[in-house]
Image (tube, rainbow, N blue to C red):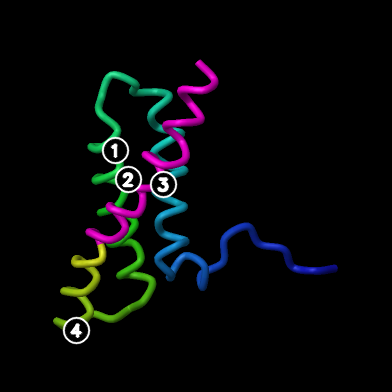
Amino acid sequence: MANINFITKEMFFNLTGCITIVTAMTEFTKILYSELPVLIFVLIFSAMVAIIRLFFCKNYSFDGIFLGILNIIPIYLGAIGAYESIIKPVTKLIT
């Protein structure tokens, strides 16, 4: 039987995987807390995913930690771009 995984560690380590996870987490949480701005959710989840990724990579040198924290920015910007270009227009079409 084939081993089928939805998200593997290799997928989680790359930027696209991180952006996808942050976007999905934001959409699921936005339903529960609709009064808060989406940008706050994206920032919190971007930081969480970047820190979790740092622990999975196990690179605890100064460079690894610095780059791990710096990775919050592209994850945040990518997730905001996904929200603004894909999810927001679809939501407007539906409502």
Which secondary structure lies at badge 4? loop
Expressed as whole percent of the image width and height from the top left, the position of residue 12 reads 47, 65
Q: Is residue 75 left or right of residue 92?
A: left
Residue at x-position 47% and y-position 43%? 24
- Gap between marks 4 and 1 measured at Cα: 29 Å
For disc 4, the neighbor class at 10 Å (few under 14, some 14 to 19, many from 20) is: few
Labelled disc at residue 80: 2
Expressed as whole percent of the image width and height from the top left, the position of residue 27 reads 44, 35
Expressed as whole percent of the image width and height from the top left, the position of residue 88 reads 42, 32
Query: Residue 90 in magenta?
Result: yes
For disc 2, the neighbor class at 10 Å (few under 14, some 14 to 19, many from 20) is: many
Q: Can you tell which quarter of the image residue 39 is in?
A: top left
Name the mark nearer the viewer: 3 or 4: 3
Quadrant (top left, top right, bottom left, bottom right) of the N terminus: bottom right
Q: Which label's residue is closer to the chain start, 2 or 4?
A: 4
Which portion, as a residue range, is magenta?
72-95
Q: Which residue bears the numbered disc 3?
A: 82
Is 26 above or below relative to 13? above
Labelled disc at residue 41: 1
Q: Tags 1 and 3 in contact by the CB under 8 Å rule?
A: no
Labelled disc at residue 61: 4
Is 83 above or below relative to 74? above
